[in-house]
Amino acid sequence: MPQVNDTQENLQKCICGQCPSYNQCMGDKTEGLYCARGKSSCEFEKNGCVCGACPLTSEYGLEQLYYCEIGRDE
């Protein structure tokens, strides 16, 4: 599986902040781009996942969901 690059361009494509599971803690820590940066340091409740709709999913051939929980695809 290809590794997502942690770049400003990819961060701009990132839709983590639109996810129903994204919470105040994640926002306060300006977390996102979990597929490149690794899993969240925040506790959260799974309320749905938008990883499948993210442009990085098709661009990098990603197959997982909830990168906020599992981190990068290695």
Image (tube, rainbow, N blue to C red):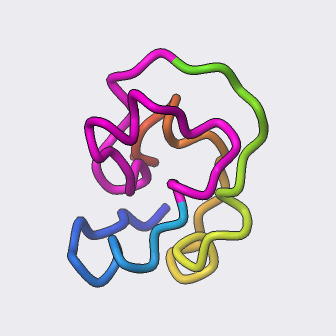
In depth, the one of 49 and 29 nearer the eye is 29
Q: Quadrant of residue 20?
A: top right
Residue 47 is left or right of residue 4, and the answer is: right
Q: Quadrant of residue 4?
A: bottom left
Judged from this view, the residue extending furthest toward the left is 7
Residue 9 is left or right of residue 23, and the answer is: left
Q: Position of residue 15 (x, y in %)?
A: 54, 65
Q: Position of residue 17 (x, y in %)?
A: 51, 55
Placement of 13 over or under 63, stated as above or below: below
Q: Position of residue 67 (x, y in %)?
A: 52, 42
Q: Residue at x 32, y 23 (%)?
A: 41
Would residue 58 be counted in the magenta stretch? no
Identify the magenta region.
16-43
Q: Residue at x 59, y 79 (%)?
A: 55
Placement of 63 over or under 37, stated as above or below: below
Q: Quadrant of residue 47?
A: top right
Judged from this view, the residue extending furthest toward the right is 48
Residue 20 is left or right of residue 56, and the answer is: right
Q: Position of residue 27 (x, y in %)?
A: 38, 42
- Numbered circles on residues, count: 0
Q: Residue at x 47, y 15 (%)?
A: 43
Q: Residue at x 66, y 20 (%)?
A: 45
